[in-house]
Amino acid sequence: MIELRSDTFTLPTPAMMRAMNEARLGDDVYGEDPTVLELEERAAELLGKQAGLLLPSGTMANLVSIMTHAPRGSKMLVGAESDIYIYEAAGATVCAGVMYEPVPNQDDGRLLLSDLRRGFPDDPDDEQFALPSLICLENTQNRCGGVVLPQTYLKEVWEFAHEHEVAVHLDGARVFNAATALRLPVSEIAQYADSVQFCLSKGLGAPIGSMVVGTAEFITEARRARKMLGGGMRQAGLIAAAGLVALDDLHRLQDDHANALRLAEGLAGIDGIDVDPGAVQTNIVMFRVSDPRFTWQTFVEAAGQHGLALAELGHGRLRAVTHNGVTEADIDRALSIVRRVLADGREH
Ligand SMILES: *Cc1c(COP(=O)(O)O)cnc(C)c1O
């Protein structure tokens, strides 16, 4: 099976398995797992922040960050197409008492400043309004096709947030893909956020885990929220060891981006597929099946029967994600499968 549903399907590399096997361990709830401490320090340093924290998932990393930034009864401005708003089971409302205010994402992933401004009441002293405490951005923006937010835009939002005395949290599940696409150190992106979460378990290829980075004070409070949510893990160095290997291998993401572009360019040459290769910036390709003989469901099912796994990602669009388990040869095979599925469809 050529697995293009998600970059979460990566399996740990042999080097990760070796590192996990040899990791020095301790009880991380006591702060005594040396491998976790090393990873937290390494993540903070890479992103240019004071401290880091290992969490079991990106969802918990976002929730812990929201709980730490935003008082109960406040609201946060968040993309209407964001993971935080769509895929995280309303955790901010349920667990943190924080209201989501969805702001439209532009096709390029941005939340317009004019739309953000609308989230701030004209009279903040008027007791009937929930007050904004946090702006969440997502980079790369998954549902907009893995697009990279421009650096000038991040700076504008950062300045806007400070003017309005709210924090910025960056959901950087794929922030290393953004850094790779921009050919910039990831700290250049992170400088425009108070906290950043990133996933070790996506393109970076580790089996489990996400990191949050921020100020030392922020991370101390986030540690309490993590414990409250049940995310305090004991010999978590097992996970951290794979994460450290992942952070040594960041240049590999370039291959994923090249493979995504190869896929998009190939798909663009196939009748019955609607795709814009110019829109592909990282490891995600969004496309539609325009052949009227297929719905996205029947197309995904037929592709699956031929050995190609694809996913729907909102509004009937299909998503293909490249990752460490996908080679250039797999991309060429995937393209043959798409051609075959459409050719077979025409015979019926
Ligand atoms: C995957 C993802 C998350 C959540 O990470 P999990 O580890 O799956 O909980 C958060 N934000 C974005 C943008 C993601 O792609």
Image (tube, helix red, strand yellow):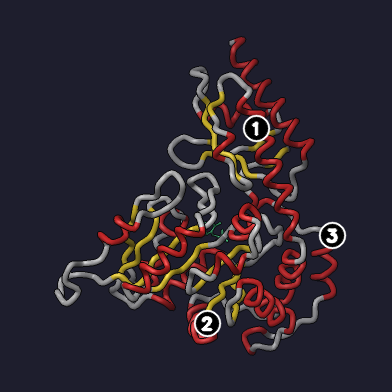
User: Which residue is disc 1 drawn over?
Assistant: 304
| SS under mark 1 | helix
Residue 346, image x, y percentages: 59, 12
Any part of residue 319 in sight: no
Any part of residue 120 in sight: yes
User: Which mark is on residue 14?
Assistant: 3
Circle 1 crowding by C-alpha within 10 Å: few under 14, some 14–19, many from 20: some
Residue 235, image x, y percentages: 70, 79
Name the kind of residue labelled 3 in the image. Pro
Closer to the camera: disc 1 or disc 2?
A: 2
Is 227 on the left-hand or right-hand side of 158? right
Closer to the camera: disc 2 or disc 3?
A: 2
Residue 50, image x, y percentages: 58, 82
Query: 57 or 204: which is nearer to us?
Result: 204
For the N terminus, which image quadrant?
A: top right
Question: How far is the residue under mark 3 from the one under mark 1?
Answer: 28 Å
Give the residue drawn at x 47%, y 59%.
152
Is 151 on the left-hand or right-hand side of 345? left
Query: 36 or 214: which is nearer to us?
Result: 214
Name the kind of residue labelled 1 in the image. Gly
Question: How far is the residue under mark 2 from the one under mark 3?
Answer: 34 Å
Q: Earlier in the sequence, mark 2 or mark 3?
A: 3
